[in-house]
Amino acid sequence: MATYSAMPDAEASIDRILSERGPLAQALEVPEKFITPNLGRVPAIMLDFWAKAGVGDLADGMLRLCLPRELETEIAQLFRNDPDFGFPILPEGVEKEETQADTEPRITDVHALAHTAFGNLLLWSERHGLVHVDIVQGLVEAPFLFNPEAAPAPDRAALDFILGADPFILDMDDRDQQPMFDRAVTKFGPMKRMFIYAPGPAATGDPIPDVDDLFPAPYPEWLEERIMTKRFTLVDLATGRFDVRPIGARKLRP
């Protein structure tokens, strides 16, 4: 029986994911002390998955699960001061309220749950649920931000759209609209943990890369540079709005 999720078939659903998308490669155990602080912040079934299997790579390495709080610094940079995904940050010189004095202010309520082999992000917002970041094109999609009535239960969303994310979402197409994952594996071999097939230099990568643009790169460093040099945009793909507003309020590097 699942420890955290109230979903009736939670344990069977986790077993099915591991059977259909596993085995979990490059697996790491997640100690309970790192699991329980996430209760109420991410879908409970993710906590059960961490407790049962840990984190690692699913779907032959296309889906790469993050440890709790992994990529926290980079995600905070992306969503700093964002009205939907961040929290107001006090300007320099402004005192905290007395009730805040002994606590560190949170920058964002968004958590990295997984990333793809090419660096796209599968995130969870405590307020708005599923968030997908196309790191190459600089697009941030939160499908239930604009249509909350359509949002599935958090555990169902995590199963269907993160742990069970479609290979079409996990792969990346080249300029001829052909998927690149298998060719990347053939060219470079499997990537070790927290490395990606980087789709070009972080600061200047083409929005539609080709296989020849790919190279192995440590993901946190590549991601940080990408975030600090590229404008990210909130999109609403369901209604065809591709430039709702800029994401965050960070000063980009030249």
Image: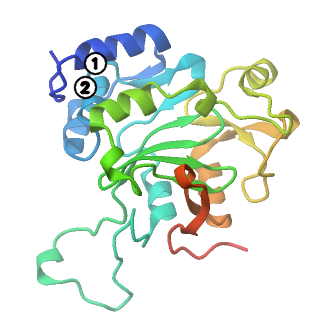
Task: Identify the secondary structure beneath mark 1.
Answer: helix
The picture places residue 150, in percent across and down from the top left corner, at: 35, 44
Whether 165 is drawn above or below 33: the answer is above
Q: Residues within 10 Å of mark 1 (few under 14, many from 20)?
A: some
Q: Residue at x 36, y 33 (%)?
A: 158
Outermost residue on the front side: it is: 239
Residue topped by disc 2:
48
Question: Residue 187 has which mark?
Answer: none
Lateral position of residue 128 relative to residue 62, left or right: left
Whether 93 is drawn above or below 163: the answer is below
Q: Residue at x 26, y 68 (%)?
A: 104
Q: Quadrant of residue 204?
A: bottom right
Residue topped by disc 1:
52
**Amino acid type at mark 1:** Lys
Lateral position of residue 146 relative to residue 62, left or right: left
Q: Residue at x 34, y 70 (%)?
A: 87
Contact check, label 2 and label 1, Cβ < 8 Å: yes
